[in-house]
Image (cartoon, rainbow, N blue to C red):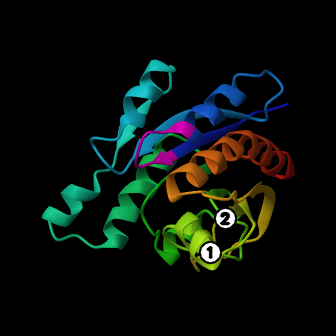
């Protein structure tokens, strides 16, 4: 089995990144995590990735804002960094940027995202707060292919998480995150096996 070269894009602490890196250490995992790219210099996940032995890169969104460069310019640099590393598959793991349609088309079928709701419910920001406001009894998380429309790509896998009496956004987020750490590596395995 030839393992695919996988990059993970992050903006924060990197807990899903860690789950993917640890899963990829298994010799039968169909991908090798070769690069972690952060959109933020201060992302804790950069240090964690280095501790876990994965090469890192920074494509700093703050620099692009300061230079008045647009989203397409950011995405062009991101694409350059990925292709220079011969990346074949991309996982978004708390990557807090909306990617341009051109970037998404370049990676179509080779880019996935984890979203903390049972899509198509509660797209966009703060889906846990959306779930609580809607009064649902069940929410969860979804791994899906990325398409130009936000959180609208084909589903790879989902898992349910109950909404408990007295849940806050923080308690619900923590339970969903535990489910994400189990679901994301399996969904990425499945997606890579289909390539």
Q: Is residue 117 magenta?
A: no
Farthest-out residue, front: 166
What is the x, y in percent for residue 9?
Answer: 49, 48
Q: What number of labels is visible?
A: 2
Q: Residue at x 46, y 44 (%)?
A: 84
Q: Does residue 193 appear in the picture of this structure?
A: yes
What is the x, y in percent for residue 177?
Answer: 62, 46
Q: Residue at x 62, y 30 (%)?
A: 21
Q: Give the range drawn in magenta.
A: 9-15
Q: As rendered, which of 192 and 21 lies closer to the eye?
A: 21
Q: Does residue 92 appear in the picture of this structure?
A: no
Res. 29 mark: none
Pointers 1 and 2 in contact (C-beta within 8 Å):
yes
Res. 117 mark: 2
Q: As rendered, which of 17 and 122 lies closer to the eye?
A: 122
Q: In this view, does 113 lie to the left or right of 98?
A: right
Res. 122 mark: 1
Placement of 19 over or under 110, stated as above or below: above
């Amino acid at each position: 089995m030839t393992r695919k070269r996988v990059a993970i894009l992050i903006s924060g602490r990197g807990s899903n990144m860690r789950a993917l890196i640890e899963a990829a250490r298994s010799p039968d995992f169909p991908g090798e995590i070769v690069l972690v790219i952060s959109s933020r210099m201060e992302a804790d996940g950069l240090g964690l990735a280095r501790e876990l032995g994965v090469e890192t890169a920074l494509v700093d969104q703050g620099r692009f804002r300061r230079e008045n460069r647009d989203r397409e310019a950011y995405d062009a640099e991101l694409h350059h960094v990925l292709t220079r590393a011969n990346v074949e598959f991309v996982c978004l793991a708390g990557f807090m940027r909306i990617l341009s349609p051109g970037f998404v088309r370049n990676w179509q079928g080779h880019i996935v995202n984890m979203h903390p709701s049972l899509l198509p419910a509660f797209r966009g920001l703060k889906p846990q707060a959306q779930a609580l406001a809607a009064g649902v009894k069940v929410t969860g998380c979804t791994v899906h292919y990325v398409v130009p429309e936000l959180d609208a790509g084909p589903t790879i896998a989902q898992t349910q998480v109950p909404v408990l009496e007295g849940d806050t956004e923080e308690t619900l987020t923590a339970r969903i995150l535990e489910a994400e750490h189990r679901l994301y590596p399996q969904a990425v395995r499945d997606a890579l096996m289909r390539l």
